[in-house]
Image (cartoon, helix red, strand yellow):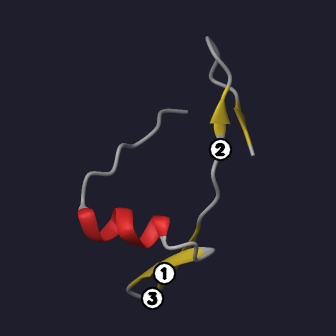
């Protein structure tokens, strides 16, 4: 799984706001932080 880097200020502020999800149009996206183990493609929630 490859991470997507976000550079848009409004999106960064929304993610950092502490809300559990963001809404774009009629779609809602759940936000949670993950950590990647070194030298693997394994992510942990």
Query: Tag 3's secondary structure?
Result: loop
Residue shown at 65%/36% (left/top)?
35
Residue shown at 33%/51% (left/top)?
6
Q: CA distance from mark 3 to mark 1?
A: 4 Å
Nearest to the eye among marks 3 and 2: give it: 2
Nearest to the eye among marks 1 and 2: give it: 2
Bin the neighbour count of mark 1 within 10 Å (Cα to Cα): few under 14, some 14-19, many 20 and up: few
Residue shown at 63%/16% (left/top)?
38
Position of the N terminus by quadrant: top right
Query: Tag 2's secondary structure?
Result: loop
Res 32 quadrant in image: bottom right
Q: Earlier in the sequence, mark 1 or mark 2?
A: 1
Q: Determine whether 1 is above or below 11 in the image.
A: above
Determine contact: label 3, label 1, CB under 8 Å.
Answer: yes
Identify residue for label 1: 27
Q: Would you say 8 lies left or right of 4 here? A: left
Residue 19 in the image, given as x and y percentages of width and height? 58, 77
Q: Which mark is residue 26?
A: 3
Residue 29 in the image, given as x and y percentages of width and height? 54, 71
Res 21 quadrant in image: bottom right
Of residue 16 and residue 37, the one placed in the foreground of this image is: 16
Residue 45 in the image, given as x and y percentages of width and height? 75, 46
Identify residue for label 2: 34
Residue shown at 45%/88% (left/top)?
26
Of residue 28 and residue 39, the one placed in the foreground of this image is: 39
Q: Would you say 43 lies left or right of 29 here? A: right
């Amino acid at each position: 799984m490859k991470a997507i880097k976000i550079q848009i200020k409004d999106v960064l502020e929304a993610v950092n706001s502490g809300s559990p999800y963001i809404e774009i149009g009629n779609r809602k996206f759940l936000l949670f932080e993950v950590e990647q183990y070194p030298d693997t493609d394994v992510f942990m929630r």
